[in-house]
């Protein structure tokens, strides 16, 4: 699933979702498989939220392929298609590929500049990955 919008001015899930969508996703990732009414009840603890609004947003998340809906009797249960970590991995990978396609070497240069702020373990992982890529290129 590819998120069409990315908001640089926001943080966390709000970069990918609207504020209510992000709250709903947080709730479902924390609890999994809930009804609209159950999600609304959790939201109500923070702020009054209309049932129809929650229903509309959750059904749109189903249409976008982010939530799955399972009907059991007269109730519909919603759960995320991906775990939070898988979603973030997928989206960051997608963004990285798009940035590489559009800006190429400039992106790599900026990513390397950003390495000054990361721990030694990440640098070691990157060095290992570069060695693997070089080895794969030689074997082609």
Image (cartoon, rainbow, N blue to C red):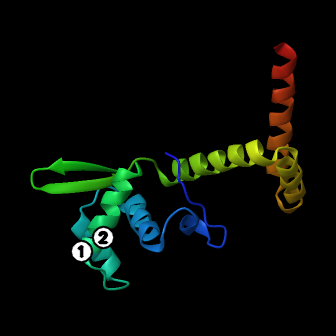
> Which residue of the protein is positioned furthest toward the bottom in this rendering?
47
* Nearer to the camera, 59 or 72: 59
Label 1, residues with CA under 10 Å away: few <14, some 14-19, many ≥20: some
* Nearer to the camera, 36 or 7: 7
Label 2, residues with CA under 10 Å away: few <14, some 14-19, many ≥20: some
The Cα atoms of the two marked residues, 1 and 2, are separated by 5 Å
Does the rendering let one see residue 39? no
Q: Which residue occupies 44% across, 65% down?
A: 26
Left or right, 103 with reference to 2:
right
As helix, strand or loop, the secondary structure at mark 1 comes to helix
Q: Is there a contact, CB below 8 Å, between mark 1 and mark 2? A: yes
> Which residue of the protein is positioned furthest toward the front in this rendering?
102
Left or right, 5 with reference to 26:
right
> Which residue of the protein is positioned furthest toward the top in this rendering?
140
**Which of the labelled discs sits on residue 94, or is there none?**
none
Measured as percent of width and height from the top left, residue 62 is found at 34, 53
Which residue has dot 2 on it? 54
**In this view, 41 is above or below 133:** below
Which residue has dot 1 on it? 51
Measured as percent of width and height from the top left, residue 37 is found at 22, 69
As helix, strand or loop, the secondary structure at mark 2 comes to helix
Q: Where is residue 11, by image quadrant?
A: bottom right
**In this view, 85 is above or below 53:** above
Does the rendering let one see residue 88? yes
Question: Which quadrant: the C terminus?
Answer: top right
**In this view, 80 is above or below 15:** above
């Amino acid at each position: 699933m590819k998120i069409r919008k990315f908001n640089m001015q926001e943080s966390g899930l709000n970069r990918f979702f609207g504020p209510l969508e992000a709250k709903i996703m947080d709730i479902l990732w924390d609890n999994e498989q809930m009804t609209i009414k159950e999600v609304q009840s959790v939201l109500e603890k923070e702020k009054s939220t209309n049932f129809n609004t929650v229903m509309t947003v959750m059904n749109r998340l189903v249409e976008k392929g982010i939530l799955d809906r399972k009907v059991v009797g007269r109730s519909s249960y919603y759960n995320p298609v991906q775990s939070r970590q898988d979603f973030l991995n997928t989206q960051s990978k997608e963004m990285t590929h798009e940035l590489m396609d559009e800006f190429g070497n400039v992106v790599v240069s900026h990513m390397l500049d950003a390495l000054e702020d990361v721990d030694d373990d990440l640098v070691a992982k990157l060095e290992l990955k570069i060695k693997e890529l070089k080895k794969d290129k030689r074997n082609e």
